[in-house]
Amino acid sequence: MPSADAEATEETPVDQARDSLLDALSAELGDALVASHRVPGRDLWIRLDTAAWGDAADYLRNRQRFRFFEWLSAIDWLPSPFGRSHGAVVDEVDTDDTGDGDDAEAAGPVTGANGFTGGDTRFQVFARVYSLTTGIGLTVKADLGDDLTVGTWTGSYPGADWHEREANEMFGITFAGHPGLRNLYLPTDFEGHPMRKDYPLMARLVKPWPGIVDVEPMPEAEEGEPTTGSPDPTAPPDVKGVGTEGPGGS
Amino acid sequence: MTDLADRRQMAYIAAQAADARVNVELEAEGMNLNIGPQHPATHGTLRIVVQLDGEQVIAADPMMGYMHRGYEKLSEVRTYPQVTTLINRIDWLGSFANEVPFILGAEQLMEIEAPPRARWIRTVLFELARIANLTLFLGDMGVQLGAVTPVFYAFRDREYIVNQIEAVTGGRFHPNFDRIGGLKDDLPAGWIADTKVALGEIRDFCDQMEDLLVGNEIFEARTRGIGVIPADVGLSYGLSGANIRGSGVDWDLRRDSPVGQGQGLAYNEVDWKVWTHPDGDSFARYWVRLQEVRESCRIVEQLLDGLPSGPIMAKVPRIIKVPAGEAYVATENPLGVMGYYIISQGGLEPFRVKIRSASFSNMSITPWLLKGAYVPDVITILASLYFILGDIDR
C-alpha cells in the first residue's frame, strides 16, 4: 500500500518529538510522573501524582509551550451498577472478582495497543493540552484520593474555570484554589453528582431501552466474524451496507 | 380591553420601574441587567447577567444549563451507532461535522480505516456542513447590528446547501449519515452537478455580504476594535476556529492534524489556504469566516472533481464492539475544535465519552472579554464569537 510507506516516513520525526517530550517531562516532574503511555505517531498520555497536578499546569504552559487548553474533566471508574455495557471486559472482571460491582480496583489499568485506560482509584481527573509549535497533544491524568480534592488549573489556563465547575457539579471533585466553584449547568440546590456511575439514569430504570432487543439474539452470528475488520480498499462494492444493519443502524 | 384594576396595576409597575431607574442614576450603583435567556442574540437560551455601571459592563456572568441534555451520560447507555444520533444535536447547524470526530475516534480504537471514496465524501459533507453553518452566521451578524437584510439572504441561500445535504443523507439538519468504517450510502446520481450550481449561489452570497456589510461604515464602526482578543489569552481560554484565527493564529486542524491530512479526512488532496486576520476584533472574526466559506467552496469543488471510485464501506463486524482503550480525535468544525475522548472497555457501549465542544470553550472567555464593554457592544461581541447553544450545553 503506497500510503503505508508515506506514513512510516512521516511517523519517525513525530515519534522523536514525543520521545524527547516524554524525556523532558520525566526529568522535570521526577517522581510526580506516575506512569506514561505512548502510541507511536498518534498520542501521548501521562499520569501524575495528585499533589503535582496543580503545578503541572504552569510547567506545561510556560515551559513546555502547551499554549492551547483543550479541556479538563473527570472519569468515574466504578463499573456501573445499572444495566450497561453488555459484554464489556469490565463486567467479566467484576463477576470473577467480587460480584457486587462496587470496587473500582476490579478494573485495573489496562495498557493496550489502543491507549491507556484505567486508574488506581475510583476517580480520575484528566485534561488535554495542545502545543501549536509541535502539533502534539498531551493527555494528563491524576488519580484522586478519598478527599476528591485536587489543585486548580485556572491560574495557568483561565479556560479551565468552566471545565472545573462542570467536573465539580458532575463528579463532586473539589478544585482547591478555584475562584468560584458554583454549579455551571445544574440548579444551585441540585443534589447528587449526575455523571457518577452510581447515579441512576432514571429514564433507563423506568423503561429499558428497546434497542437492546435488537442486540440480544445476535451473538452467535458474531462468533464467525472477525472482531476487527481490516481496511480493504479493493474489496468489491457489495460490502456496502455491512454494519449498517447492526443495532441502531436502520 | 383592560379593566380599571389592570390599568392601575400597570401604572404601579411603571412607576416602580421609573423609581428604580432614578435610583440607579442618583446613587450610581451597579445595575444588574439580564441579557437572555430569550434575547435574539443568544441563539437559543443563554442568559448573561451583566452588572452595569452606566452603559459600561463591570462584570458579566453567563448562566448556562437551560439546554443541558446530558449527552455524556446518555452516551454511556447507548451503542456506538446510536450515539451518533445524539451528537447530531450538539451543533445543529452543522450536524454532519459533529459525527465525524466521534466516528473517527471509534475507527481509531477498532483499527478500521474507511475506504478512500468514503473519506472524500465525508470531507465533502463536512465542508457542506461548514458552509451551511457559517452562511447563517454571515447574515446573522448583520441582523444583530441592526441590518436586517442580510439574514434573509442567508436563509435563502443556505437552502441550496441544505437541499444538497438532504439529497445525500435524507436529513436537512440531522443527517446521521456517518458510519464506523464508511458512510451509509453513496452519492445520488446527478448530485455533483447540482452541488456545483449550489456552490455558485454561495459564492454570489459571499460577494453580496461583502458588498452589504464589509466596507459599510456603520458595520465597520460597530465591529472594528470591538472585543479584541489577544492570541495568547484566547489560546489559554481554549478558543479555536475562526475566533483564534481572527487573532492571527495560523492554526487549523484540517491542515495541522494527521486526521485532517488523510487519516480520516482528505484535505491533503486539495489546494486550499488557511485564512487569518491580525486584528483579533469582531470585524476580524467576521472577515475570517467570510473567507472560510469561500475557501470551503473551493475545497468542495476540487474534491468533487477528483472523487475516487470504489466502495464506501470498509469491512466491519455486524455488531460494533470496540476494543478496550482510549482515543481522542478532534477536527476543525464550523465553530472551532470539536473532539471526543472515547473510553472503551471492550463493550458495545462507550464507558465514557468526554465531548469537547467548541462553543463551550469559546464562550468561557466572555466574563473576561465583556468587562469594560458597552451594552451595544455586548451584542456585537456575542454575535462575533458565534456560538450555538447546543454546542455549549451539550
Image (cartoon, coloured by chain):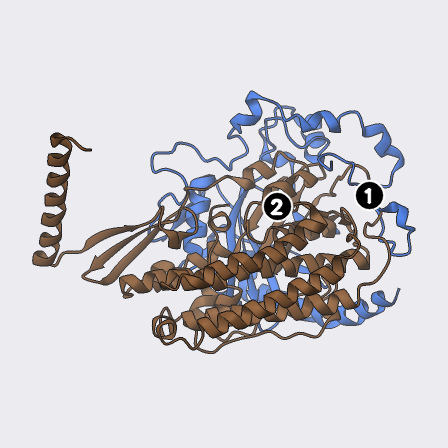
Under mark 2, the amino acid is His
Find residue B58 and report its image quarter: bottom left
Colour in which chain B is drawn: brown
**Is residue A226 positioned above or below B194 on the image?**
above
User: Label 1 crowding class (10 Å Cα cut-off): few <14, some 14-19, many 20+?
Assistant: many
Q: For the residue labelled by badge 1, is the local secondary structure a helix, a strand or a loop?
A: loop
Q: Give a yes or no on whether discs 1 and 2 share a subunit.
A: no
Chain drawn in blue: A
Query: Chain under label 2?
Result: B
Q: State yes or no: discs 1 and 2 in contact (Cβ < 8 Å).
A: no
The picture places residue B310, in percent across and down from the top left corner, at: 86, 57
Say which of B215 and B363 sits in front.
Answer: B215
| Figure disc tally | 2
Mark 1 against mark 2, which lies toward the viewer? Answer: 2
Q: Which mark is residue A241?
A: 1
User: Label 2 crowding class (10 Å Cα cut-off): few <14, some 14-19, many 20+?
Assistant: many
Find residue B283 and report its image quarter: bottom left
